Amino acid sequence: MPSRNLVIERKNIMELAGKNVLIIGCGKSGIGAAAFLLREGAYPVLFDESEKLTEKTVRESLAVKMEETGVTIGAVSAKIVLGKLPEEIKEQAKLLVVSPGVPVDSPLVEEFQKRGIPVWGEIELAYQKERGQVVAITGTNGKTTTTTLLGEIMKRHFETSFVMGNIGYPYADIAGKTTEQSVTVGEISSFQLETIESFHPRVSAILNITPDHLNRHHTMENYIAAKNNITKNQNNNDFCILNYDNKDTRKLGEACPAKVLWFSVREELREGVFLRGEEIFMSQGGKSESLMNIREMRLVGLCNVENVMAAILASEAMGVPKEEYLDVIKNFRAVEHRIEFVEEVRGVAYYNDSKGTNPDAAIQAISAMERPTILIGGGYDKESDYDQWVEAFLNKVKLLVLIGQTKKKIAACAESHGFRDIVFADTFEEAFGICVQNAVGGDAVLLSPACASWGMFSNYEERGRLFKELVYRERERM
């Protein structure tokens, strides 16, 4: 799978200078987009319906972002509108930029679409300045680990590389720094993929697809279509990495415009990367070669074996020598909040999987546990189905501690499957205390909620950091 160092053909690139651009949302994404547009000489208008914001705080945030990215002029020239959006501003806009939290079927977005005005998210906007090759990672689970690992591999091999996207590094801050020789690795969510037009990765990956965000996408068909948008502008000179074991990604491979590279932990593939026993193999032309033993990894769980396989295929597609990517893989540690080992206190191992925000991700975390486990679950309701998650408790979970909006819904599901070792908690701190009281040496305490953090926390990072802080406090009591 050699890399063909082709220059990506960039279609539909828009000249932004001098254009009136309306940005919906004054959060991090909106502020980043405004700063990007100001640097490009556009005329952005930041709009937010929130009554909690003030023009002063929004403008201060924009000034800070401009300074962070090395440009100190222009922050005062952006127009800021809060509350109600005047008709004349809508009429003047030649481009609409939406934050990830804005649904594409909202009335305002649909109004712009009917008028033929482009509707972009930050990924499409920033791509207008991309000059190098892009490796883009999506999927329901595993995106952050795979993207972070690939970022380390690309940094080892290429002189200039970047990591961006849903992982916490805004693409708008990075795109202007790229060159024809650079590589950008991006974690891209389904929300971000809904609004792409020209975004063209050299290598794409759809790690898996399981039900998630159905409160936003409404149907699985819509969700799958959003994920598949990552291949929208690819061709047979590009590569798409797909999970052979996942029925939805396997089906996407049938009509994929790029060359498909498969990985599997269940099947021995004639072409691709697969698992045999504890060995990861690469097969080409029917000939198989062992690459490494999974016990050489510092990551745990079959989910991380899949992530590593995807990283191997992406590295091969980008022409990275085997000895380089294997060395990085063997020394790579779990990313924060994803089956992250925190500490062992009084013989109890504590794992932070706050990024397990849907049932499938939480199943993977439970499967990785090798001890009797006390599990903290629950949170914001994304209209998920919890049956398969509960079924994974068998011979693994000894006690389920539930919090948040979904606690009664999850408890009812668990009881319908015959699992009744359940305790409710009103606060996260109370839930952690229940875990400590019930754990004995040899147990594990796992935070893997199967739900989003909203309602109790700003994001999953905040939830995970509190969990780790409570673990460290418990250690200090020894």
Image (spheres, helix red, strand yellow):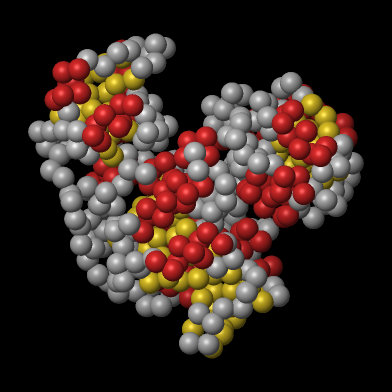
Q: From this viewpoint, is residue 336 visible?
A: no
Residue 254: name its quadrant. Answer: bottom left
Q: Give the residue displayed 65% in from the left and 41% down from the top.
A: 385
Q: Give the residue displayed 45% in from the left and 62% down from the top.
A: 252
In this rendering, position of residue 57 left or right of residue 273: left
Q: Is residue 371 above or below residue 429?
A: below
In this rendering, position of residue 277 left or right of residue 138: right
Report the number of discs. Answer: 0
Q: Position of residue 375 (x, y in %)?
A: 77, 40
State the quadrant of the N terminus.
bottom left
Q: Position of residue 470 (x, y in %)?
A: 71, 30
In this rendering, position of residue 464 left or right of residue 166: right
Residue 23: name its quadrant. Answer: top left
State the quadrant of the C terminus.
top right
Q: From this viewpoint, is residue 196 visible?
A: yes
**Of 216 and 71, the residue lying toward us:** 216
Q: Is residue 126 above or below residue 39?
A: below
Q: Is residue 326 above or below residue 57?
A: below
Q: Give the residue displayed 36% in from the left and 17% down from the top.
A: 49
Residue 409: name its quadrant. Answer: top right
Q: Position of residue 269 (x, y in %)?
A: 57, 78
Q: Position of residue 203 (x, y in %)?
A: 37, 63
Q: Give the residue displayed 73% in from the left and 34% down from the top.
A: 410
Work out which residue is located at the far left of the displayed protein and give it.
18
In this rendering, position of residue 57 left or right of residue 420: left
Q: Is residue 452 above or below residue 350?
A: above
